[in-house]
């Protein structure tokens, strides 16, 4: 059960179906609305249709790299909260993602408690403006 005041619209972008499924199930248990994409072009289409508040974005994607997807999403929706998901967690990787415009960086597999804490902080700080 979620302790958030309101659900977020969250787009999961990952080319691994198992990763998407695990995140989808967890986020739905917490009460969030969830959409998914398996590659860069699909992510851009889903973002336009679903209008997420948060995007959990894998960096190594087929079609378009996560950095390019993030840049295009940021152009369309500057208020969007972009969270990089990567199997690489070296300081340089994190720095590059934050410099490229990501708001947050989580190393896969991400700790559910860390993800939950991040989402709570976004809601309570009003970082994610409702885009209704």
Image (spheres, rainbow, N blue to C red):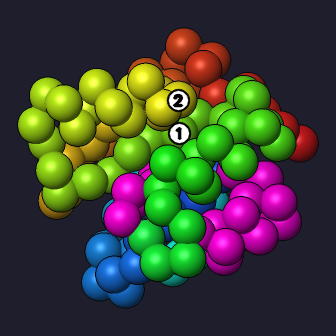
Furthest toward the bottom, the residue is 17
The residue labelled by disc 1 is 82
Foreground: 63 or 82?
A: 63
Residue 41 sits inside the magenta stretch: yes
Left or right: 32 with respect to 92? Answer: right
Q: Nearer the viewer, mark 2 or mark 1?
A: 2
In the image, residue 127 lies at what x, y percent? 60, 20
The answer to whether residue 53 shows anywhere in this view is no
Residue at 58%, 34% (x, y): give it. Answer: 81
Q: Is the residue under label 1 in contact with that under label 2 (CB below 8 Å)? A: yes
| Mark 2, residue position | 101
> Bounds of the magenta span?
40-60
| Horizontal side of residue 73 vs 90, given as left or right | right
Crowding near the residue tagged with mark 1, few <14, some 14–19, many ≥20 C-alpha atoms within 10 Å: many
* Label located before the other in sequence (2 or 1): 1
Residue drawn 16% across the image and 50% down it: 88
Instruction: Give the residue drawn at x 26%, y 54%.
Output: 86
Across and down, in percent, residue 123 comes to 55, 26
């Amino acid at each position: 059960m979620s302790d958030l005041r309101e659900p977020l619209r969250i787009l999961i972008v990952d080319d691994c179906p198992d990763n998407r499924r695990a995140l989808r199930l967890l986020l739905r248990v917490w009460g969030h609305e969830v959409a998914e994409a398996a590659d860069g072009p699909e992510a851009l289409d889903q973002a336009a249709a679903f209008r997420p508040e948060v995007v959990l974005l894998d960096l190594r994607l087929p079609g378009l790299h996560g950095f390019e997807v993030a840049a295009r999403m940021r152009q369309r929706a500057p208020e969007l909260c972009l969270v990089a998901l990567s199997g690489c967690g070296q300081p340089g990787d994190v720095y590059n993602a934050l410099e490229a415009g990501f708001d947050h960086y989580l190393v896969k597999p991400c700790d559910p408690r860390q993800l939950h804490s991040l989402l709570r902080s976004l809601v309570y700080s009003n970082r994610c403006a409702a885009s209704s």
